[in-house]
Image: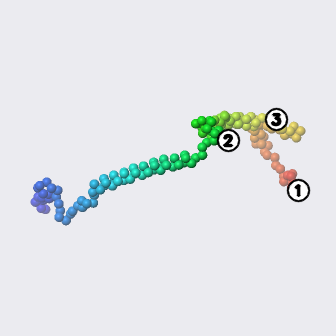
């Protein structure tokens, strides 16, 4: 093993250079990168200005080509577009009924109709009974069976 000290750098404070190794300083130019980024920013800003100009132009063009509202709507003032045109769906502003209230009333009416006990045709022996009672009767007795011979005959 060699015990001599190897001098790898220069004494003047310069970094060591090997004669076979070199760095290509022209690969990265900071000035070119800043120029590219500033050009990209400028192009983006110009594109934004063009888009704003096109938006204003098309808005003015659309406003000038629109037909004026009819006199009946002008009489209503600024809020003539506050309500959608008829027929209005339930739940929109200006509709007289509340859809949740209507649903509760419908469920209540259906429940009352399903729990009603009355004669539909007393002479024929047809009665309306509550659904729970009818389900109990079907569970106990089963459904009546009909034979094809008793069905209506086609003429």
Mark 2: few/some/many CA within 10 Å (<14, 14-19, 20+): few
* Image quadrant in which the C terminus is located: bottom right
- First in sequence: mark 3 vs mark 1: 3
Q: Mark 3 or mark 1: which is in front?
A: 1
In this figure, which residue is indicated by the disc labeled 1?
155
Q: Position of residue 85 (x, y in %)?
A: 64, 41
Is there any visible trace of residue 77 in the rendered image? yes
**Residue beneath the point at 89% across and 38% down:** 123
Q: Secondary structure at mark 1?
A: loop
Residue toward you, 125 or 120: 120
Q: Marks 1 and 2, how far apart in space?
A: 47 Å
Tell me what residue is drawn at x 40 percent, y 51 percent: 46
Q: Residues within 10 Å of mark 3 (few under 14, many from 20)?
A: few
Q: Estimate the spatial distance between the alpha carbons at disc 3 and disc 1, rounded to whole Å.
A: 36 Å
Q: Nearer the viewer, residue 42 or 13?
A: 42
Which of labels 3 and 2 is toward the front? 2
Image height of 55 relative to 25, above or below:
above
* Mark identifier at residue 84: none
Mark sitting earlier along the chain (1/2): 2
The nearer-to-camera label among 1 and 2 is 2
Please tell me which of labels 3 and 2 falls first in the chain.
2
- Residue drawn at x 78%, y 45% is 142
Asked if residue 49 lies left or right of residue 93, the reply is left
> Separation of disc 3 and disc 2 at Cα?
39 Å
Q: Percent x, y for residue 60? A: 51, 47
> Mark 3 sits on what residue?
118
- Name the image quarter holding residue 72: top right
Q: Which mark is residue 87?
A: 2
> Looking at the image, which residue is at 11% across and 55% down?
12
Relative image position of residue 108 (x, y in whole percent): 71, 34
Q: Are marks 3 and 2 in contact (CB under 8 Å)?
A: no
Q: Could you tell me if residue 93 is visible in this image?
A: no
């Amino acid at each position: 093993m060699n015990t001599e000290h190897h001098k790898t750098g220069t004494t003047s404070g310069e970094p060591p250079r090997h004669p076979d190794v070199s760095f290509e300083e022209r690969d990265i130019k900071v000035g070119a990168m800043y120029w590219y980024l500033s050009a990209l920013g400028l192009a983006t800003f110009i594109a934004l200005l063009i888009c704003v100009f096109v938006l204003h132009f098309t808005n003015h063009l659309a406003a000038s080509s629109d037909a004026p509202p009819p006199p009946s709507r002008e009489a209503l003032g600024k809020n003539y577009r506050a309500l959608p045109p008829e027929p209005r769906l339930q739940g929109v502003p200006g509709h007289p009924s509340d859809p949740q209230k209507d649903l509760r009333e419908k469920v209540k009416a259906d429940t009352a109709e399903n729990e009603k006990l009355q004669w539909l045709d007393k002479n024929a022996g047809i009665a309306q009974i509550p659904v729970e009672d009818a389900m109990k009767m079907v569970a106990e007795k089963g459904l009546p069976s009909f034979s094809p011979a008793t069905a209506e005959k086609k003429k």
